[in-house]
């Protein structure tokens, strides 16, 4: 067992744990570009490389090493061995609104970062700080946003809310909630043509890898229609079509192939992708779901294997109408940054499967929605009123940033959302007349010349949120639709009590994620407030939130260990 080094002072962390646990029990009774974008794609330019004690390695921006939970060394002088690989996304700084009132990013419904938290906690470990992408923690949960009617003009609703923050009452939290239209009640969906690309290399031997992949495939057959087709391509040292596109009605044939899969050899992932896309084209269904699902521990070591090479390949294939989901399995080889990058460019999602429970939940609740898109290339632009908002910062979405002047460039790729998906984004606002909260190690607020371009937010509004998206069958050059909604200052609550319970949950989870990632804005003293929120009876009966409650308490106890 590796010795953990926690940079939070032990005495303080132990007192926090004691408070958190007792209250839990009580309540249970990059520089600006030419587009002027000073937002989330410009983290602190000071880049440093760290290797963390979870058996993984990570490289990227570390804005606050003093707040990092696990530093890159074990007892002894030997360097940490190679393992799961992560790249830090940094942390968005505050931006002075007068210099840049626009914040633009792509929608994200990935859950992999939170999946990794679940996996590591089940293994008795805190997650690698650089594995934490805050928005994926927040978006893992359901917030009960009202969905639009099936015949609504747009396939999603927009929910805006603002109130004083749970933690810093001198700032205001803004929530942007997007809820996609729900799947039809009768279960009707578009016909599906699925190709499972299965890594059968030697690194996939353990029980939480290839055997769990096989379980994923068998469970998927249960949610497909008899006329849907499934193909299976494997890759190791070489690639093979183990099953051409076959109707699910022939499940015995499909199951025989699934049960025959065995691991061994190196990892020719790029060649496997080529062959999987070829099978997707062979079974292509016009107007249907044509999707490749890559199941791997993330270790490509034969042929093109750099992220840039793989992204270029996926971008080309995306234009054919075939999308890509990436499912990671196990630990020790995951190339997290690569897997996220290729799923983004493949117009799909990225998740990590940890056990049979997570697989069953994914297949039942997320499998089809992640393929059955209702909107694609969704961009979100938040325009703040400089007369009312002095500064702001977006929590998360650091690697989903889009230049402000590309918001209405409809050739720019962005995020996809499926039936039933929701997206939540949180902003911390400093209203005019107030000061930016001080934080040790925080980057200087981004400031510059006064913004002189035309503004669209009305003088009487606090903020305007604009959503731009395309129909699922639109091409890269087809025009997009745009929806906008404003929030007036009078809609801002006067106390934290006016945050609905779901808003409070999102804020609490975001704060916890900031502590895990070692954000310069993280404050371990907030753990007691997080504990109060997640222990509320209002969340009883939601299995995801109940599980988080348990994981949170365990994580706080681990943070207190010397």
Image (cartoon, helix red, strand yellow):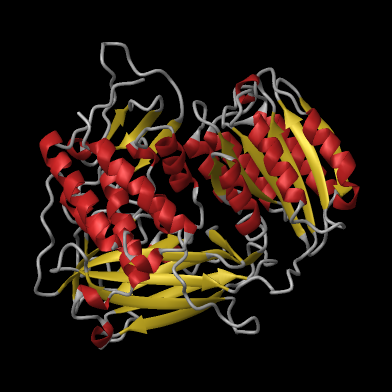
Question: Residue 542 location, x and y as percent?
Answer: 47, 62
Q: Quarter of the image containing the C terminus? A: top left
Q: Quarter of the image containing the N terminus? A: top left
Q: Is residue 342 left or right of residue 119?
A: right
Q: Give the quadrant of residue 417.
A: bottom right
The residue drawn where x is 17% and y is 41% is 13
The extreme top residue here reads 77
Q: Give the quadrant of residue 277.
A: top right
Q: Is residue 271 visible?
A: yes
Question: Residue 361 location, x and y as percent?
Answer: 59, 52
From this view, report whether residue 428 is shown above or below residue 215: below
The residue drawn where x is 31% and y is 46% is 553
Q: Is residue 310 left or right of residue 227?
A: left
Q: Nearer the viewer, residue 224 or 422?
A: 224
The extreme front residue here reads 29
Q: Is residue 470 left or right of residue 104?
A: right
């Amino acid at each position: 067992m590796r010795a953990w080094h926690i940079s939070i002072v032990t005495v303080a962390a132990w007192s926090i744990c004691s408070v958190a646990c007792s209250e839990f029990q009580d309540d249970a009774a990059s520089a600006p570009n030419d587009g002027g974008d000073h937002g989330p794609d410009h983290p602190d330019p000071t880049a440093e490389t760290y290797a963390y004690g979870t058996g993984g390695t990570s490289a990227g921006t570390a804005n606050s090493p003093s707040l990092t939970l696990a530093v890159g060394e074990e007892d002894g002088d030997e360097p940490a061995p190679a393992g799961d690989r992560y790249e830090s996304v940094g942390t968005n700084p505050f931006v002075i609104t007068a210099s840049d009132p626009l914040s633009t990013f792509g929608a994200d419904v990935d859950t992999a970062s939170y999946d990794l938290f679940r996996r590591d906690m089940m293994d008795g470990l805190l997650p690698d700080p650089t594995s934490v992408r805050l928005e994926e923690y927040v978006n893992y949960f359901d917030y009960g946003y009202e969905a639009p009617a099936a015949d609504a003009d747009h396939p999603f609703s927009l929910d805006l809310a603002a109130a004083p923050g749970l933690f810093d009452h001198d700032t205001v939290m803004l929530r942007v909630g997007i809820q996609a239209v729900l799947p039809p009640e009768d279960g009707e969906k578009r016909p599906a043509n699925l190709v499972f690309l299965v890594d059968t290399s030697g690194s996939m031997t353990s029980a939480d890898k290839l055997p769990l992949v096989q379980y994923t495939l068998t469970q998927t057959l249960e949610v497909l229609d008899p006329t849907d087709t499934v193909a299976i391509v494997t890759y190791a040292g070489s690639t093979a079509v183990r099953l051409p596109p076959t109707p699910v009605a022939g499940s015995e044939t499909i199951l025989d192939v699934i049960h025959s899969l065995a691991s061994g050899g190196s990892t020719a992932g790029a060649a496997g992708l080529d062959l999987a896309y070829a099978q997707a084209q062979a079974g292509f269904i016009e107007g249907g779901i044509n999707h490749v699902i890559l199941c791997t521990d993330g270790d490509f070591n034969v042929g093109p294997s750099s992220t840039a090479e793989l992204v270029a390949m996926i971008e080309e294939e995306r234009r054919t109408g075939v999308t890509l989901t990436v499912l990671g399995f196990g630990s020790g080889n995951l190339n997290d940054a690569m897997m996220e990058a290729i799923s983004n460019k493949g117009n799909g999602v990225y998740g990590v499967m940890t056990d049979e429970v997570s697989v069953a939940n994914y297949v039942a609740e997320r499998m089809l929605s992640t393929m059955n898109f209702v909107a694609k290339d969704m961009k979100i632009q938040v325009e703040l009123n400089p007369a009312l908002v002095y500064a702001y910062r977006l929590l998360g979405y650091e690697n989903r940033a889009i230049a402000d002047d590309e918001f209405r460039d409809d050739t720019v790729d962005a995020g996809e959302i499926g039936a039933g998906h929701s997206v939540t984004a949180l902003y911390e606002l400093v209203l005019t007349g107030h000061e930016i909260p001080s934080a040790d190690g925080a980057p200087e607020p981004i400031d510059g010349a006064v913004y002189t371009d035309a503004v669209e937010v009305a003088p009487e509004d606090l903020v305007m949120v604009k959503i731009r998206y395309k129909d699922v069958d639109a091409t890269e050059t087809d025009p997009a639709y745009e929806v906008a909604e404003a929030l007036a200052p009078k809609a801002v609550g006067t106390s934290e009590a006016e945050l609905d319970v779901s808003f409070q949950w999102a804020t609490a989870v975001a704060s916890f994620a900031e502590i895990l990632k070692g954000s310069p804005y993280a404050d371990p003293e907030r753990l007691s407030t997080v504990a109060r929120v997640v222990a509320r009876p209002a969340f009883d009966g939601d299995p995801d939130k109940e599980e988080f409650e348990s994981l949170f308490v365990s994580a706080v106890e681990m943070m207190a260990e010397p």
